[in-house]
Every structure is written in structure tokens, then in C-alpha cells.
Image (cartoon, grey):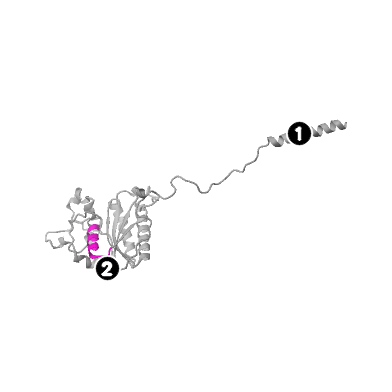
Amino acid sequence: MTERLDMAIKIKIMAGTKSKRARKRHVQQELFRHGGKRKGAGRKPKGRRAGAPHQKRDDFNARHPLHVVMRVVPAVGNMRRRELYKAMREATITAAMRERFRIVHISLQRTHVHMLVEAKDKLALARGMQGFQISAARNINTVLRPDPYRRRRGSVFADRYHVEVITSPTQAHRALSYVINNWRKHREDQQGLAKTWLVDPFSTGILFPDWIEMAERDWMWPMRPTYDPLVVRRPESWLLKEGWKLIGTISARTVPSKRP
């Protein structure tokens, strides 16, 4: 009887050992993975990034005007359309209410916007540009709505805007001519009805009082009486008021060759 009991205990122990060896070890699965390479992550290659690089802005004095360039995303399409012109005009009205940030001239091209601005300091420039871009983007997205009940969502302006500080009469002369005559550089003056225009209706050229052509007796503005120009402020900096005149006059027929 005792031998049978001992044999039963040995069999039970051996069976328990086998079952322990056969049991698989539990490994806790990782629920979330942090870090690692993700598709589309990281800095974009230099050649593929839109706008100005993310570097510290140059310091400037309040007496120095600025040439600002903003590029729009491809989804917005051609900026030289009547409905987008009206949207940008509403944004210029909002910007004209600011005192520390002033848009003096602006021109709308197909894929970008040129502006001559004056700002009290870097903070005034940053806040003024932020407010202007937000207002313009809201208006443009309203125009480009997919249906009457929804406003378009998404970016309007690509990356950062480019800023060039104007410090001399030569720079001011070139910048003025470049901004308000920029349509001729892109040959917008050679298509359709635009061939009869002397100044670009998608710019503030009509508000520039010092065209050399103003002295021509038979010269007339080609704009309709109902034309509403973009709203800008008069310049306060000496460079944009008088300084540029030291270099010479500005013609509405000038074709800018390159960015100043």
C-alpha cells in the first residue's frame, strides 16, 4: 500500500514538472511606441520648403521701411481674381486701423503678395503681419468655401513671409518701382484687356502720386469709376516720402528686372 502511494506521488510530481515546462512565458505587449521615424516627420529639405527660412529676423529702425513678400499655397489658386481682390481689400481695411504697423503699398500677383510696410519695431511688425494674414486668410477662405454653408479650411499663406529692410534712397527707389510695377515683370500687362492699362489694378499703383506720366496731358487712368483701390496708409518714413526721389523719377512703364 505504501509503495503504491509513493509511486502515485512521484507520477504527480513528474506531471507537474512537464506542465510547467510546457507553459509559455507571458510577454507584455507594448501598447504605444514613442519616438522613432515617422513618414513626413522632421525638417523638410531646403529646396522644398516654402517661404523664408526659420531664422532670427534682422533688427531694424522705425525709420527704415520694409519690403515684405508672402507666398500663397497652391490650393488657393490665382490671386489675381476679382473675388480674391475684394477679400484682400477687406484685410487692408483692417490693417489700416493699426498705428504701429502701416501698409504703404501692396500688389497682388498670381502666387504671392508684395508689400511695402512701416513698423515701429519687430514686435509691431510681427503682430501687424499676424493680424493682416489672419484677416486675409479668413476672407479668402470665405470666398473659396466649398458650399454656401461651410467656409474653406486650411492654410492660405505658405510658411513664413520674407522681409528685407530698406536703408538707403537707392533701395527705396528700387523697392517702390519693383512693388507697384511687379505685374510687368510677370508679363501680366501683355494679356487681354490689361494691354490697355498703364498701372496694375491689383496693386496700389493708382494711389502713387509721383508717376512721371502724371505730367502727360493725354494720360488717363484706365480704371472704372466704380473701382475701389486697396486701402493703405501714407508713408511716414523719409525714405518712402522724399528719400527715393534723390535717385530719380519712377515710370509706370518700367519693367523690373529682379528683386531689389
Mark 2: amino acid: Ser
Which disc, if any, is residue 25? none
> Visible in this render: residue 48?
yes
Mark 1: amino acid: Met
Which disc, if any, is residue 237? 2
Residue labelled with disc 1: 14
Q: In which quarter of the image is residue 128?
A: bottom left
Coordinates of residue 171 in the picture (x, y in percent): 24, 62
| Residue in view at x 73 percent, y 36 percent | 17
> Visible in this render: residue 226?
no
- SS of the residue under disc 1: helix
| Residue in view at x 22 percent, y 59 percent | 177
Residue 177 covered by magenta stretch: yes
Q: Residues within 10 Å of mark 1 (few under 14, many from 20)?
A: few
Q: Which of marks 1 and 2 is in front?
A: 1
Coordinates of residue 37 in the picture (x, y in percent): 48, 46
Coordinates of residue 250 in the picture (x, y in percent): 18, 61
Check if mark 1's residue and mark 2's residue have beta carbons within 8 Å: no
Coordinates of residue 167 in the picture (x, y in percent): 27, 65
What secondary structure prevails in the magenta region? Answer: helix
Q: How crowded is mark 2: few (under 14 residues within 10 Å), some or many (20 or more)?
A: some
| Residue in view at x 69 percent, y 36 percent | 21
- Closer to the camera in the image, 69 or 153: 69
Residue 14 covered by magenta stretch: no
Query: Quarter of the image containing the N terminus?
Result: top right
* Range of residues picked out in magenta: 166-178
- Closer to the camera in the image, 73 or 256: 256
- In the visual, does 252 lie left or right of 60? left
- Closer to the camera in the image, 107 or 67: 67
- In the visual, does 137 lie left or right of 171? right
Query: Quarter of the image containing the C terminus?
Result: bottom left
Q: In which quarter of the image is residue 259?
A: bottom left
